[in-house]
Image (cartoon, rainbow, N blue to C red):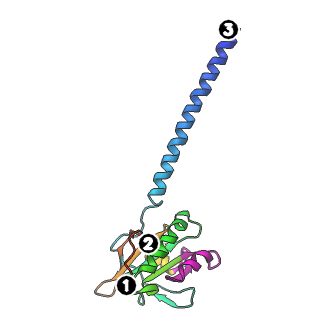
Amino acid sequence: MAVLTAVLVLVGFIAFVDLVLTLGVVKRLREHTELLAGAGGMPVTVAVGTEVGDFTAASVDGDVVSSELTPTDTVVAFFSPTCQPCKEKLPKFTAYARSRPGGRSQVLAVVVGSAEEGAEFIERLSPVARVVAEDRQGPLHTAFGTAAYPTLLRVTAEDDGRLVVAENQIDLDQPFPALT
């Protein structure tokens, strides 16, 4: 009987230690998840100073969008409808875009996938930006070398007319003041 009691106490102790260790691992995984979510996921893939390649595409409104027709100081955003950080940043981005001087002509949004797949994004972005729906191998993705979502850039034209990335980390919490 004493042996049985000793075995039960040992099994109970091992189960208790296992439970404590499992709870520690779960806590650590939650901390890592929060850290990764706060870091915005994947690192920025387009460096400041990168020259933007030539591109021509049709917006969802049927307008032509090209590197030659992109005004200086334009914000270019890449979103994927399957990306959770994209869904979270979309409301802040639309508020930011709405506050930009120059209106829609100064904001270009690219939604990954077909117009049907990105319908919700397109509907929310269209009032504040020129919107292009394209796949990952589309002309804008190729010209900018984008691979992570969301990617928010500000581009400007150099003196020789080349379009380059001027900013690759746009603070959406600092919208432009309304023009008076």
User: For residue 174, which quarter of the picture?
Assistant: bottom left
The spot of residue 65 in percent (x, y) is 48, 88
Task: Examine the rendered structure and indicate whether residue 37 appears above or below residue 148.
Answer: above
- What amino acid type is highlighted by mark number 3? Ala
Q: What's the CA distance linking mark 3 and mark 2?
A: 69 Å
Q: Which residues are magenta?
A: 111-138
Q: Residue at x 59, y 32 (%)?
A: 19
Residue position marked by numbered label 1 in the rendering: 179
Report the residue that reaches farthest toward the right: 1
Would residue 134 be visible to someone looking at this image? Answer: no
Q: Is residue 126 magenta?
A: yes
Between residues 144 and 91, which one lies in front from this camera angle? 91
Residue position marked by numbered label 3 in the rendering: 2
The spot of residue 128 in percent (x, y) is 49, 82
Q: Secondary structure at mark 2?
A: strand
Quadrant of the snapshot with the C terminus: bottom left
Crowding at mark 2 (Cα within 10 Å: few <14, some 14-19, many 20+): many
User: For residue 9, which quarter of the picture?
Assistant: top right
Q: What's the CA distance linking mark 2 and mark 1?
A: 23 Å
Would residue 86 be visible to someone looking at this image? Answer: yes
Q: Is residue 82 magenta?
A: no
The spot of residue 49 in percent (x, y) is 33, 74
Between residues 124 and 60, which one lies in front from this camera angle? 124
